[in-house]
């Protein structure tokens, strides 16, 4: 059974940082293109960042230079380092293999 479990969300002030983690079980992380999505209240889910098995990374324009996606295949874990957070980054963040999704972790950026 494939399962994705995110963690690391929380409340942070503008300009702060968080690191999200996503642990994949039931499959090898190295087999997948992995992605982080987010969904803010009243908005559609959007792709934030993606990483291929060859470590090619892509980002939505709004997070370029602030967020970094990475993967640790040995520990079957995907990360999203988020720096210089803004209130508009507030959303539920999900990791995905493209077929399977985690339950999401809430990120709230507010003073």
Image (spheres, grey):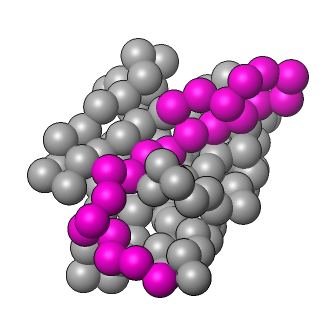
- At x 76%, y 30%, the residue is 40
Quadrant in which residue 109 is drawn: top right
Q: Residue 23's spot in the image, x, y percent?
A: 49, 74
**Residue 12 appears left or right of 15:** right
**Is residue 88 or residue 104 the one in the foreground?**
104
**Residue 24 appears left or right of 58:** right
Residue that protrudes farthest toward the right in the picture: 42
Q: Residue 100's spot in the image, x, y percent?
A: 57, 59
Quadrant in which residue 37 is drawn: top right
Q: Residue 91's spot in the image, x, y percent?
A: 72, 37
User: Does the rendering let one see residue 87?
Assistant: no
Quadrant in which residue 75 is drawn: bottom left
- At x 59%, y 28%, the residue is 46
* Quadrant in the picture for the C terminus: top right
* Quadrant in the picture for the N terminus: bottom right
Residue that protrudes farthest toward the top in the picture: 61
Q: Residue 83's spot in the image, x, y percent?
A: 45, 40
Answer above or below: position of 75 versus 15.
below
**Residue 75 appears left or right of 85:** left
Residue 75 magenta: no
Q: Which residues are magenta?
A: 26-47
């Amino acid at each position: 059974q494939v399962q994705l479990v995110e963690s690391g969300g929380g409340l942070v002030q503008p300009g702060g940082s968080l690191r999200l983690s996503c642990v994949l079980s039931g499959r090898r992380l190295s087999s997948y293109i992995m992605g982080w999505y987010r969904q803010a209240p009243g908005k559609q889910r959007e792709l934030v960042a993606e990483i291929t098995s060859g470590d090619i990374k892509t980002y939505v324009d709004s997070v370029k230079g602030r967020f970094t996606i990475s993967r640790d295949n040995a520990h079957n874990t995907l990360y999203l380092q988020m720096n210089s957070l803004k209130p508009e980054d507030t959303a539920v963040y999900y990791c995905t293999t493209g077929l399977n999704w985690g339950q999401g972790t809430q990120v709230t950026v507010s003073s």
